[in-house]
Image: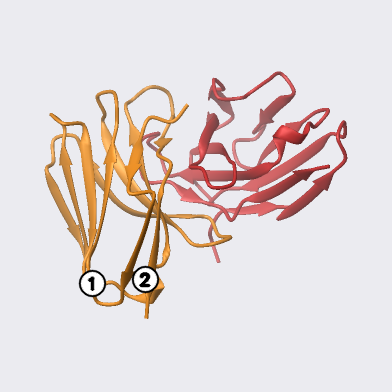
Chain colours: A red, B orange
């Protein structure tokens, strides 16, 4: 289908390892968002891109978290020196134009840090 | 931090009954959206209501918005077992790209 895809779907990392999570948004969608969802909680905003520009990164919990979208399509969320508290589902969403519009979410990447 | 608070946290009903979920928020909003999340899957958009709208319908869904009380409700009529999921409200208030989600209501519809 033509939905948002994320890879890998599951990632197990040892504490201290670096991880990279990939998001392929719907083709032509200008806006891309990353969210973090802990078990039993609602998604928490991490960062937002409009094309290749990162317009809001206020939700990134620490400087170990870094996101990029260099060509305005695929995005990568990188977490350096992972900690146990980073264990969560990382959701990517895209929307056609407006930041406040309907968002299409991917299935998420479940990250487990041991 | 999450802006929305949803009530109840969990709801269990029989197939055919109506389900009502409530959402309260703290600051003025541009729009409010409801999403559904099935176990182990991503979020699916259900309905968007703008701050100048009071009620909106989509199939078996009815959403109301009361900006004076900073609250919204989602009504699912004639529920089905397939409606079993977590339901989240999310608010957008025109600051950056943030869509702020509530904690969610876990709905269980028993056949």
Locate residue B25, reporting x and y percent: 29, 31
Mark 1 residue element: loop
Residue B20 in sight from this viewpoint:
yes
**What is the distance, in whole Å, between disc 2 and disc 1 at their CAs?**
9 Å
Q: Report the disc number at residue B17.
A: 1
Mark 2 residue element: strand
Locate residue B27, reporting x and y percent: 28, 23
Tally the marks.
2
Q: In this view, does A77 lie above or below A103?
A: above
User: Quick check: B59 left or right of A108?
Assistant: left
For the N terminus of chain A, give its image quadrant.
bottom right
Location of residue B44 by image quarter: bottom left
Residue A50 in sight from this viewpoint:
no
Residue under the image location 87 percent in, 31 percent down: A16
Q: Which comes sooner in the sequence, label 2 or label 1?
A: 1
Residue under the image location 61 percent in, 24 percent down: A60
Locate residue A53, reporting x and y percent: 56, 25
Locate residue B14, reporting x and y percent: 30, 74
Location of residue A88 by image quarter: top right
Residue under the image location 55 percent in, 25 percent down: A59
Task: Using a 10 Å C-alpha cutoff, classify the residue at mark 2 as few (fewer than 14 neighbours), some (14 to 19) or many (20 or more).
Answer: many
Task: Using a 10 Å C-alpha cutoff, classify the residue at mark 1 as few (fewer than 14 neighbours), some (14 to 19) or many (20 or more).
Answer: few
State which chain disc 1 sits on. Answer: B
Q: Report the disc number at residue A21.
A: none
Camera-side residue of A98 and B1: B1
Mark 2 in CB contact with mark 1 (< 8 angstroms): yes
User: Quick check: B39 left or right of A74?
Assistant: left
- Residue with the mark numbered 2: B109
Residue under the image location 16 percent in, 52 percent down: B56
State which chain disc 2 sits on. Answer: B
For the C terminus of chain A, give its image quadrant.
top right
């Amino acid at each position: 289908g033509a939905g948002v895809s994320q890879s890998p779907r599951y990632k197990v990392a040892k504490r201290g390892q670096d991880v990279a999570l990939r998001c392929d948004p719907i083709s032509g969608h200008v806006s891309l968002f990353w969210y973090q969802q802990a078990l039993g909680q609602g998604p928490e905003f991490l960062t937002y891109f409009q094309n290749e520009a990162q317009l809001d990164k206020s939700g990134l919990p620490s400087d170990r978290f870094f996101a990029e979208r260099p060509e305005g399509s695929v995005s990568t969320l990188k977490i350096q020196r992972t900690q146990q508290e980073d264990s969560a589902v990382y959701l990517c969403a895209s929307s056609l134009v407006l930041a406040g519009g309907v968002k299409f979410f991917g299935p998420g990447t479940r990250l487990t840090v041991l | 931090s999450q802006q929305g608070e949803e009530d109840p946290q969990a709801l269990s009903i029989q197939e055919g009954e109506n389900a009502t979920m409530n959402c309260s928020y703290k600051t003025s909003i541009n729009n409010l959206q409801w999403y559904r999340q099935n176990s182990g899957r991503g979020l699916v958009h259900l309905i968007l209501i703008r701050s100048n709208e009071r009620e909106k319908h989509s199939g078996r869904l009815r959403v109301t918005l009361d900006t004076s009380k900073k609250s919204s409700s989602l009504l699912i009529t004639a529920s089905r077992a397939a409606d079993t999921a977590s339901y989240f409200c999310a608010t957008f208030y025109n600051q950056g790209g943030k869509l702020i989600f509530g904690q969610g209501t876990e709905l269980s519809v028993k056949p």
